[in-house]
């Protein structure tokens, strides 16, 4: 009976995508204690995520272990990434000290920062630094080290760079409610994690293809960020999740 109830309950949640606790209590005629146990079981299995007053179903995420070459990634979803870059740039203010991450989305925000004044941009990304070289209104600081040819970034010992940032704009390979924020490079992940701790306000910059993707390296949880900038509204489960966790969704 217990197994059948849980099976039916999970099927109900899956079909409806998001369900309030009151609906589950009424439909399955269980006590609040029993419902909490069932929900915990589903959550432990990564099948659902709790939101305020209810649950949402976690669709099976696409798993990735590597990323395409830099040039190919830059050309993929180019217009969407340009839109994300423009939105990200609108959040930068005069006199800010910001971190711009590697990846083929974050650096595009520089295209829309030509009118800003006294902004310092710190990065370990060669593409970012090359663009800053042509922009007299920005001060660029390089987190240097050994160049990584596949990512166009520098491997650095983050303990030597105790910079503080007003805002950080971080790229990601995957966004998943059950697995949070992930990427496919340990060195890149270490840099992202370090910057997130040093920044007052953290934004993830990612086009829509990054949602429901899980890579092998977890670099941050959702509570580490304050906003997600993307090119279009994600599915309702993400909208509900971000609202319940006070993460600003910008698209």
Image: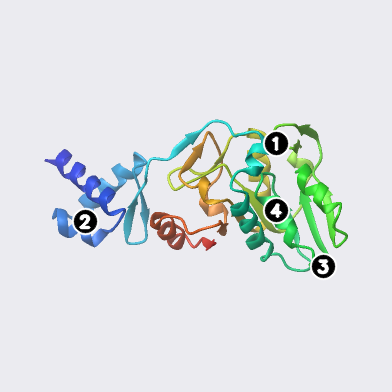
Residue 10 seen anywhere in this rendered image of the structure: yes
For disc 4, the marked residue is: 108
64 sits to left or right of 19: right
Q: Position of residue 247 (x, y in %)?
A: 51, 60
Tell me which corner region of the image, top left, top right, bottom left or bottom right, holds residue 19. bottom left
Tell me which corner region of the image, top left, top right, bottom left or bottom right, holds residue 84. bottom right
Which quarter of the rendered picture does the C terminus lie within?
A: bottom right
Which quarter of the rendered picture does the N terminus lie within?
A: top left
Q: Residue at x 77, y 45 (%)?
A: 127
Q: Position of residue 199 (x, y in %)?
A: 68, 56
For disc 3, the marked residue is: 117
Among numbered discs 4 and 1, the one appearing first in the sequence: 4
Badge 1 element: loop
Among numbered discs 1 and 3, the one appearing first in the sequence: 3
Which residue sits furthest right? 136
Q: Which mark is residue 24?
A: 2
As measured in the structure, the alpha-carbon distance from the residue carrying label 2 to the one carrying label 1 is: 47 Å
Q: Residue at x 23, y 46 (%)?
A: 11
For disc 1, the marked residue is: 151
Among numbered discs 2 and 1, the one appearing first in the sequence: 2
As measured in the structure, the alpha-carbon distance from the residue carrying label 4 to the one carrying label 2 is: 45 Å
- How dense is the environment of label 1, judged by Cα within 10 Å: few (below 14), some, or many (20 and up)? some
């Amino acid at each position: 009976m217990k197994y059948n109830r849980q099976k039916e309950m999970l099927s109900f949640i899956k079909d409806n995508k998001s369900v309030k606790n009151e609906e589950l209590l009424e439909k399955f005629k269980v006590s609040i204690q029993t419902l909490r146990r069932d929900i915990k079981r589903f959550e432990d299995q990564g099948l659902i995520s709790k939101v305020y007053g209810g649950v949402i179903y976690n669709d099976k995420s696409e798993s990735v272990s590597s990323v395409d070459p830099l040039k190919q990634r830059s050309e993929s979803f180019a217009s969407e990434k340009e839109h994300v870059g423009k939105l990200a740039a609108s959040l930068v203010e005069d006199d800010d000290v910001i971190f711009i991450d590697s990846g083929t989305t974050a650096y595009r925000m520089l295209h829309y920062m030509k009118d800003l004044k006294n902004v310092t941009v710190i990065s370990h990304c060669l593409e970012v630094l090359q663009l800053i070289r042509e922009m007299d209104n920005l001060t660029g600081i390089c987190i240097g080290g050994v160049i990584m040819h596949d990512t166009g970034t520098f491997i650095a010992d983050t303990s030597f760079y105790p910079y503080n940032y007003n805002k950080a704009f971080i790229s990601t390979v995957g966004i998943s409610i059950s697995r949070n924020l992930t990427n496919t490079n340990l060195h890149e992940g270490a840099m992202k994690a370090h910057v997130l701790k040093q920044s007052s306000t953290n934004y993830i910059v990612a086009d829509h293809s990054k949602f429901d993707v899980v890579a092998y390296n977890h670099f941050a949880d959702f509570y580490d960020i304050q906003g997600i900038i993307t090119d279009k509204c994600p599915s309702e489960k993400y909208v509900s999740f971000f609202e319940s966790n006070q993460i600003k969704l910008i698209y």
